[in-house]
Each structure stands twice: as C-alpha cells, then as structure tokens.
Amino acid sequence: MEQPSALEARTYGNLIGGEWRAARGGDTFDSLNPARRSEVLGHFARGSTLDIEDAVSAAVAAQPGWQRTPMPLRAEVLARAGRLLEERKEELGRLMTREMGKVLTEALGDVQEGIDMAKYMAGQGRMPVGEVVPSELRDKRCFAERVPIGVVGCITPWNFPMAIPCWKLMPALLAGNAVVFKPAEDTPLVAIRLAEILVEAGLPPGVLNLVTGLGDEAGAALVSHPRVRAVSFTGSMEVGNQIAATCGKLGKRVSLELGGKNAMLVAADADLELAVDGALWGGFGTTGQRCTATSRLIVDRQVLGDFQERLLDRVGRLRLGDGLDPATDVGPVINSKQLRRIHSYTEVGKQESARLLTGGEVAEEGELSLGNFYRPTLFTDVRPEMRIAQEEIFGPTVSVLPAEDLADAVRIANGTRYGLSLAVYTRDLSRAFWAVDRLESGIVYVNAPTIGAEIQLPFGGVKGTGNGHREAGTTALDEFTEWKTVYIDYSGRLQRAQIDTGQG
Ligand code: NAD
C-alpha cells in the first residue's frame, strides 16, 4: 500500500517486512488534534495478534543479516537518519504539535532529542563493545563482548512521540537487534514518519517493523509473543507492572520506565525568582505531561508566603491555547479521557481539604472549547499523605507542600512510591550536596527543575518508577544486548581453571 506523505486524513498502514500494509482485520482508529478535536490527522491500522505475528516473523527473518552487518555500517544508517530528522525538524515539530499538542518550541526540542540520540548512537558504533581481560592461565585469552538479543519489542507513550521512540530504536538497532515497534495510539503519525526516515536511511526490510494499534490488542500480543526476546516499555505504572508480570511468566527480559511524582525542594536560602522560573517550567511545561514533571513543590515555611505569591502571579499569566500559536505557553492535554482524569484529581484535592489557589477547571472559552484544555492548577496546604501528593496526575496540576526545614523537605520528597526526578534549590553548596546524597531518585537536579534530561547520561528511576534499567547514555546498550564471554586456549593442552593455575 502506498504511504501518503501529505498531511491529510489518509489511511496509514503498518510497516511489515519493508512494506506498508493495512491491518489484517481491516480495522482502523483515528488520531485527533487535541487542540481541535474535529481535526483528524489520519486513520491508522488497528493492529491485532495477526499483524504482530507477521511483524515478528519479518523481524526474525531479517535479524541475522542485520547482526552480521558490521556495527560501523549499522551506525551509518543511524547517522543518515539523524541527518534526515535534522532536515525535517521544522515539519516534524509542526506535525507533533498537531498530533500531541505540545507547544511548537517544545515539539522542536522533542525532535532535537531524537536527532541527538541518532548522532550519539551513530558515534557509539565505533566505540568498544567489550572487555579484554587477562587469564589466570598461560597461553589463554579471554574477552567479553556485547551481542544483540534478537527480536525486541518497543512500546512507547504519547508524551514524547519522537524522543522516546528514538531512545529505544536507535540503541536497539545499533546493537544488531530487529525491532517490532508499537507506538502510543494517540501519536501514530509521528511514529510512522520516524519509521519512514529509518527506512529511507537504509535500514533493510524487516529490521524495523511498526504495528500501530491499541495497548491491550497489538501491545499485549507483542509482549506475549514467544519469539520476542525482550520488551522495552515506557508508560504508566499500572500497564508496566502488568507487562512485567507477563514477561516474568514467559521468562523474557523487560525494561520499564514508568511514572513519577517528582518534587522540587525550595530551601530557605534559595534564589526565589530562579525557583519560581523552575517551578513554572517544570510544573506546566508540556502541560505537566512529562514523566519528570514537577508536580510537588516542597517549600521551607520561612519563604513559603513569598514564593507562593510570586508563583501564583506567574501561573495566572500563563496563556492556554493551540501550541502552533507563538503566544501560547500551555497547550492542550492529550485526550478527553485524560482531561476528565485530571479534573477528577481537582475534586480529590478539594475533598482532601487542600486549598485551591487557581485553576481547577476545564477551559472552555472561545476556541478552547474545541480542544482538551485544562487551566493551570495550583493547590496549597497540601499534606504529604494526600492522594494529590502521592499519585501521578500527568497534567497541569501542581501541589505546594510546606516543610519545616531541608531535612523535612527531603523526607517528604522521598515519601512516595516513585523515584524518578527530584530537584533542590539552595544557594549553599554544602546543603545542595547534603540533599543530593539523601534524595531517592534516579535523577537529581540542583537549581534546575525536575525536567531537562540530556541524552548522553543515564535516564531512569528507582523504586516504583522502573526495574533498574537506564535508557540513554552508554547504559542504553545494556538494555538491548547480552554479554558473550569467550575463552581461547592456545596452549595445546588441557588447562583447568582454579586447579592448574600457577603451574607450567
Ligand atoms: P500507558 O501505560 O497507558 O501506555 C503506554 C503504551 O503502552 C502505549 O503504547 C499503550 O498502547 C501501551 N499499552 C497499554 N496497555 C498495554 C498492554 N496491556 N500491553 C502492552 N502494551 C500496552 O501510558 P501513556 O498514557 O501512554 O503515557 C503516560 C505514562 O507514561 C505516565 O505514567 C508517564 O509517567 C509515563 N512515562 C514515563 C517515562 C519514563 O521514562 N519514566 C517517560 C514518559 C512517560
């Protein structure tokens, strides 16, 4: 089936074995612009078990040839993909804003993260892939090298439609795996554009297969397919834990990047203007729909009043609107289900007797009624045990919690089941390091908000946020490779390790 390139509501297929094909069942689903629900970006193949079967078969057939392709040549494909992403950055950013809603500057940043990852992984293609280690025996060499896992499944959320797929696909492909990719059902078109670019960059047929569809259909079929040796998942804790249980039963490898309940700690000596800038960007950037979003502000009582006043003023000035409008600060939320969920947390906060300072309602004036807009919402007098301080809301809702001192703030910050990103604002270097040593999260920032990861460093969380894996940085390859240890004995006689050591 021909793959349309114009941005119009056309029907798009799955990429299987190098061909774009309709779903075997013939069903489709739509992707809508969250700023204007009547705008349909396209009709997408609703993949099922049958399509996953086809995609996995294509991947199994293609993987050995890709593995035998020298790594620097595999890296060349990624480098070319990076250049194509760069050439099309503006167009892809605009498409992303229409499909996912984030403001254009942020969408361009999301594409840039994909470009960065492509270039970084291309560079890794000529880096060491193992270790040469001395043997305890004479005339014997030992080394250990990374090898691909085989066929891997990548399942991604909608909030970073380009960056997160690139975080998974680039290292998985560089390592020599074949991939079956199931993107989020809210952002299939950006995923299709990425797959097209990788194909255009020279990826052989079947090495990357893309199946669009729903989580409990295509997603679940991918997770449980016996030929898929590893699953890389980013998404909610609920789905992640379900996937981990399935993978546990089937004995396959799984890496999880799940939610967060991230906090910014504001010490009594903090630069308050800087902290307010950070809270605004961390809390309401991407409409609060980042796994690292700053959803709790834990503020020393000594500066609470001052901080809150400044923040409230700034939140009141945030402009809601279509992300393509340069005047917009905060875009829509992804879909109407999420809009209802965010509002239900406002009701929970009120019932828990947190004090609503601003927002707390769906925005419906003028053109906003056409999309999924929620007013930037600020609660104060929030206690650590309240649900709005414990559960991930994934929207423009931020809670202010008072703290007695920095030690109390650290205790509150650590008191959730998540452990992704925490930030501390202080002018005192000793206090900053004191906090860094005690904060329980995979990522810690000092004098910067909880968002803003760079691709050359490990990314991931502790506690309920993940299962010990890290994406990005050189650690990205851990997720997508096995180790093979090789011993070569050229002594011409039987040498027994631990027994003949020191002889001859
Ligand atoms: P989600 O868990 O609903 O969906 C994520 C993906 O999983 C989608 O592609 C979906 O189709 C698929 N899926 C759903 N049910 C499935 C099933 N039973 N089997 C297999 N696949 C299934 O999450 P979402 O709403 O798309 O994204 C928001 C969540 O993602 C938030 O919790 C956020 O914190 C998290 N997130 C985490 C990170 C991180 O790196 N830690 C980054 C971004 C987003």
Image (cartoon, rainbow, N blue to C red):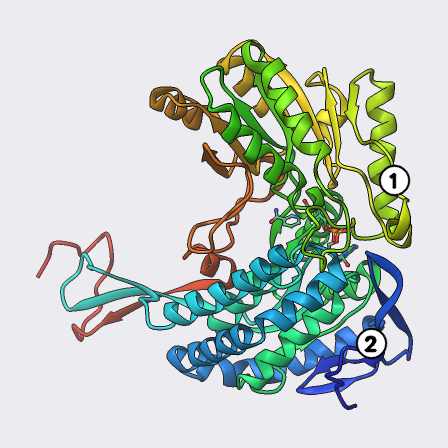
Residues 175 and 407: in front is 407
Percent x, y of residue 7: 76, 77
Q: Is mark 1 within 8 Å of ligand 1?
A: no
Percent x, y of residue 240: 70, 48
Pointer 1 residue: 362
Which quadrant of the rendered structure holds the C terminus?
Answer: bottom left
Q: Residue at x 64, y 80 (%)?
A: 196
Which quadrant of the rendered structure holds the N terminus?
Answer: bottom right
* 243 lies above or below 75: above
Label 1, label 2: how many angstroms apart (C-alpha)? 40 Å
Viewer-side label of 1, 2: 1
Q: Is residue 190 left or right of residue 343?
A: left
* 336 lies above or below 18: above
Query: Circle 1 — which element?
Result: loop
Pointer 2 residue: 50
Q: Around disc 1, counting alpha carbons within 10 Å, would you say few (fewer than 14), some (14 to 19), or many (20 or more)?
A: some
Q: Residue at x 75, y 64 (%)?
A: 98
Percent x, y of residue 68: 45, 83
Q: Is residue 145 left or right of residue 393?
A: left
Whether residue 317 can be seen here: yes
Amino acid type, label 1: Val
Residues 349 and 107: in front is 107
Q: Is residue 153 left or right of residue 482?
A: right
